[in-house]
Image (cartoon, rainbow, N blue to C red):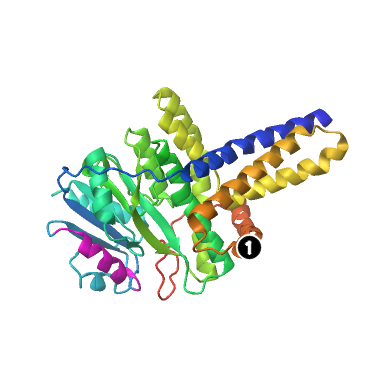
Amino acid sequence: MTILINLILLVTALGLLIPILVLFIECSLALLPKKVQEFDATFPPPSIAVLVPAHNEESGIATTLKELSPQLKETDRLIVIADNCEDQTAGIARNYKTIVLERFDQENKGKGYALDYGLKYLEADPPEIVVMVDADCVCHPGTIDRIAKLAGTTARPVQAVYLMEQPPLPTPKDSISALAFMVKNLVRPKGLSRLGLPCPLGGTGMAFPWSVIQKVSLASGNIVEDLQLGLDLAIAGTPPILCLQARVIGMLPQQEEAAKSQRTRWEHGYLKTLLTQVPKLVGESFSQKRFDLLAMAMDLSVPPLSLLVILWVVATVLGLLVLGLGVSWIPFILLLGEGILIIISIFGAWVKFGRSQLPLLTLLAVPLYVLWKIPIYLAFLAKPESKWVRTARDETDTSKS
């Protein structure tokens, strides 16, 4: 029995070591001095079409379009796909220099279908670069130009840094959520970019050469269609890259139920993708002899931070409890070392990137945030989310659709 317990604990500790070590390496590399991305000044500005999928976004789409319009040339196109809208989204969009496409299909709902509809519209007169921006996000000035030029010069998909802003009256949970989002979308991708490795696609602030995006179909109800798209493109030979000089900002929903619904959809979709795509990426990395695909598999193997912490805590407590049965200390010592790596990773990310927005005392709310997430993970075991559901908006909300 003791041998069996030793074996189970050791396998568990080694299994957790992989994602924890990946997290630590990525976060550590991100702390190095900024590596400036060079843009080819001689590269002529490409023709751009910006696709904005929108479902009942009348409360925030005006802000999005106001920020987008000045970033485009006269010859560029700004296209809003009003998808199954029951409000004034299309009418508001027409007040700006936009092409408005209205789509009605109650059977096929979701952002993927809307984007595919926009791509089909462009087939008759395709641009050099297609940019995709959610209707509830704000692009910092210069973002469209930077990601479009980088996509044009590299012939690869490009992802802007996508961050979440806290609501006007943030709770400690909102602050921790924004920090976790920053670690996932800025810190870890920056660490990967230091090694010249691909980044995941985040769903908004993305630029694609037409020659790349025309080869794929986005028409699906996948709840993390953007993440899957990036993996498919990487396997096909065009892995996405990060543009650190470009920023897209969304806002966390302030309503409790909306926040929970949003996190459930994101994290269930991510976990399902992790379980199905990590083995595929590893297999493709060996068959194609490509290290970048293996790196993407390792990055994808890191579960959401809350779940990683929960798994580590459970394993460590069990390891401590069975020490009295005469089992080896090695798994427990290994787990303690992994805990130190987690703390260093998160604290280092906070010091470098989040200290100005997140007071140190707020970090004390991390345990409460982790507890809030437990029902989400239990629901994944019982009944994982599989359908696209729009996140309810606050009155002035600009959260991810």
Instruction: Give the magenta part as a residue range.
Output: 59-73
Q: Is residue 315 visible?
A: yes
385 sits left or right of 137 in the view: right
* Horizontal relation, residue 357 to residue 290: left or right: right
Q: Is residue 278 magenta?
A: no
Locate the N terminus by quadrant. Answer: top right
Please, which residue is most extreme toward the bottom here?
395
Q: What crowding class fits label 1: few (fewer than 14 Cα within 10 Å), some (14-19), or many (20 or more)?
A: some
239 vs 149, left or right, is: right
Towards the viewer: 231 or 365 = 365
Q: Is residue 82 above or below residue 306?
A: below
Q: Give the amino acid at mark 1.
A: Ala
Q: Quadrant of residue 91?
A: bottom left
Q: Classify mark 1: helix, strand or loop.
A: helix
State the image coordinates of residue 228 (x, y, percent, origin top left).
41, 44
Name the image quarter holding the C terminus: bottom left
**Residue at image x 66%, y 46%?**
311
Q: Which residue is mark 1?
A: 365
Residue 3 location (% of width, % of height): 80, 28
Q: Is residue 311 above or below residue 401?
A: above
- Residue at figure coordinates x 28%, y 42% from the top left: 38
Pick whichever, 201 or 214, lies toward us: 201
